[in-house]
Image (cartoon, helix red, strand yellow):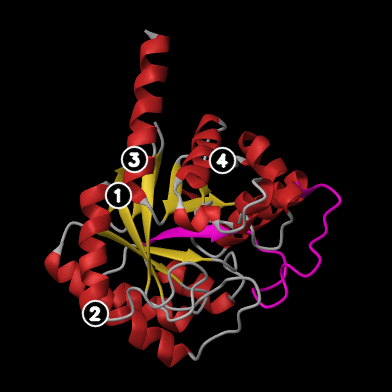
Amino acid sequence: MRHWQLRNSLWQIPPQGAIIGILNVTPDSFSDGGLHNSLHAALLHAEKLLADGAHIIDIGGESTRPGSSPVPIQTEIQRTIPVISAIKHNFPNALISIDTRNPEVAREALLAGADIINDISGLASPLMRNLCAQSSCGIILMHMQGDPLTMQLNPHYSDVVSEVRDFFRSRVDLAEQCGISPSRICLDPGIGFGKSTQHNLELISHLSELRYRNLPLLMALSRKRFLGDILHNPDLPKISPIPTVTMSIISALNGADLHRVHDVAPLAHALSLLHSACFFQKN
């Protein structure tokens, strides 16, 4: 049983695994842009995510799809902070993550009630590290080669598993040196962020080798393009949850503790079935 330090409580990750429901309040995210970029629509979707079994809601105000450019910080703040405040008002016990690489946005999100900072840059910014050191929030530390604008042009590794593992070790150690307890960190290998299909599959297959200091591992596979590439049907991951659920279950079997997805209910059912089958097998 793994735990994750969030704000002032030590959160026990459910034995079947935890689900992070995606709530993008952007006009241009790759699969759901424009669907939830009004406060009313975002709140309704948050309610659905929680009802479907999400343990955490991850709110993003900047698209980081391959080829995307940064948005102004003030725009990201205007998109996300009212949504965080509204969710906390309507669902006080909901755990909320802010998906941002900008410390200014993260600071406002924490003030509005966010519990977790989900940083795709892996705490690259000294300002973000300082903010996290001054806070008690949970942190999702992700690996990315390059940046969203260029990351998929020609990703290259000598050994993707060892390089991502070494990145986790160096960043967690750096965070600790900055005053951030490792118990607050969850590790995300960044599937699709500067990785080819082969790189993604290698990381999923060797997920347990990425574990460092027994920290939780998050897999974010939802509607990723490489799933469509494997199936020779680029649109299938967007219209059917089956590719995401299947690869998420494989990741769970390989050691994933948390799963970040758009379609919460199908994965919640699949994880419950997997947990029941494994529990029966052990007994």
Identify the residue position indicated by label 4 in the image.
213
Badge 4 element: loop
- Label located before the other in sequence (1 or 4): 1
Q: Is residue 43 visible?
A: yes
- Residue closer to the observer: 179 or 85: 85
Task: Measure how far apart labels 2 and 3 are at the Cα level.
Answer: 26 Å
Q: Which mark is residue 39?
A: 2
- Label located before the other in sequence (3 or 1): 1
Identify the residue position indicated by label 1 in the image.
55
Identify the residue position indicated by label 3 in the image.
268
The image position of residue 117, as x and y in percent, is 43, 66
Identify the residue at horizontal 27%, vertical 56% (top origin).
49
Dividing the picture into quarters, in which one does residue 43 lie? bottom left
Task: Measure how far apart labels 1 and 4 are at the Cα level.
Answer: 23 Å
Q: Is residue 216 visible?
A: no
The image position of residue 67, as x and y in percent, is 66, 77
